[in-house]
Structures are given as structure tokens and as C-alpha cells.
Image (tube, helix red, strand yellow):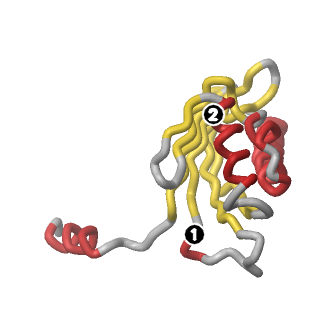
Amino acid sequence: MDNTNDVKEIENLFEKLTIAWDKGDGTAYGSCFTDDADYVTFQGEHLQGKKAISETHQELWNGILKGSTLLGEIKKLNFIEPDVAIFHGHGVVKLRWQRQAPNKRDSINTNIVIKQNGQWKIAAFHNSRITKPGLMQKIFTKFSK
């Protein structure tokens, strides 16, 4: 199956998401998602629906995240069905007063994208901070050998 065009369209969707973030545009950001999308933030907050995703992000861009930029890229993309794919993105937010984003804020996000009416949209997004193994994980790993 040749899905070269779909790969490019999904990459464009991720770029559109980034551009909307950089502009602080909640409406444009929300347009990247399905109407009933699920969005889990790195803090575990569960936003349900494009409207909630748009409004919550607009509030952030009107406040603490004003002037921030999103740096990111797709790391892995797999098609489950011709119109359903999963991709992992790597991203980090650079706040307006920072010269560069700190590594400790790197995140990985898992996205389920679906093709609706000929356009790819994000149906589910789950974001997590990238961390090194903590003490408990090291202890459990040691005892499980």
C-alpha cells in the first residue's frame, strides 16, 4: 500500500498544530482535532472535544503560555487501517523569555489520527513528560531479575 500522500498530510497536520501553538490561536489548534477528540495533558488532565481543547489552550496562551513556541517532530508513524494511524511525536515548549527550551520539559505524545471527509484529524492525543527511571523503578527492576 502506497501511503506517501497520507504520510505527508499527517506531517502537515502536525506542522499546522505547531503553527497554531506558536500563534496562540485556539481555534486553529482545535481545528486539528475531531469534534469528539480526547486530549490528555502531561499533567493527566482529560479534555474532551475540540471545543474544550481549543478553549483550554486559548486560556493558556492568553496567560502563562503567551508568546511560547512549540518545537516538535513526528518520531514514528504506523497505519493501522488505510484511514487510521498512530504516531508518536516528540515536543517541547519554549517559553517567551527562554533562549531555548530546557530538556527536562521534553514530552512524548501518542496520537491516533483518522481520515474524515478526506482530511486527517487527531482523534486522541496523550502527552507525557520524558523522564529517566526513578528510584522505585530502579528498585523494582533490580528485584525482578
Residue at screen point 75% across, 53% down: 62
Circle 1: element type? helix
x and y, in percent, of residue 109 in the image = 57, 52
- How many numbered discs sit on the rendered protein? 2
Residue at screen point 14% across, 70% down: 143
Asked if residue 3 shows in the view, the reply is no
Q: Nearer the viewer, mark 2 or mark 1?
A: 2
Is residue 81 left or right of 115 when viewed as pictured?
left
For residue 104, what is the image quadrant?
A: bottom right
* Quadrant in which the N terminus appears: top right
Q: Nearer the viewer, residue 59 or 37?
A: 59
Residue marked by disc 1: 105
**Other residues around mark 1 within 10 Å, as few (<14) / some (14–19) / many (≥20):** some
* Position of 130 relative to 1 (above/below): below
Residue marked by disc 2: 52
x and y, in percent, of residue 58 in the image = 73, 45
Q: Nearer the viewer, residue 113 or 127?
A: 127
The three-letter code of the residue at mark 1 reads: Arg
Is residue 139 left or right of 98 when viewed as pictured?
left
Identify the residue at the far front of this view. Answer: 63
Marked residue nearer the N-terminal end (2 or 1): 2
As measured in the structure, the alpha-carbon distance from the residue carrying label 2 to the one carrying label 1 is 23 Å
Residue at screen point 81% across, 46% down: 25
The three-letter code of the residue at mark 2 reads: Ala
Identify the residue at the far bottom of this view. Answer: 99
For residue 139, what is the image quadrant?
A: bottom left
* Quadrant in which the C terminus appears: bottom left
Q: Nearer the viewer, residue 95 or 18?
A: 95
Asked if residue 35 shows in the view, the reply is yes
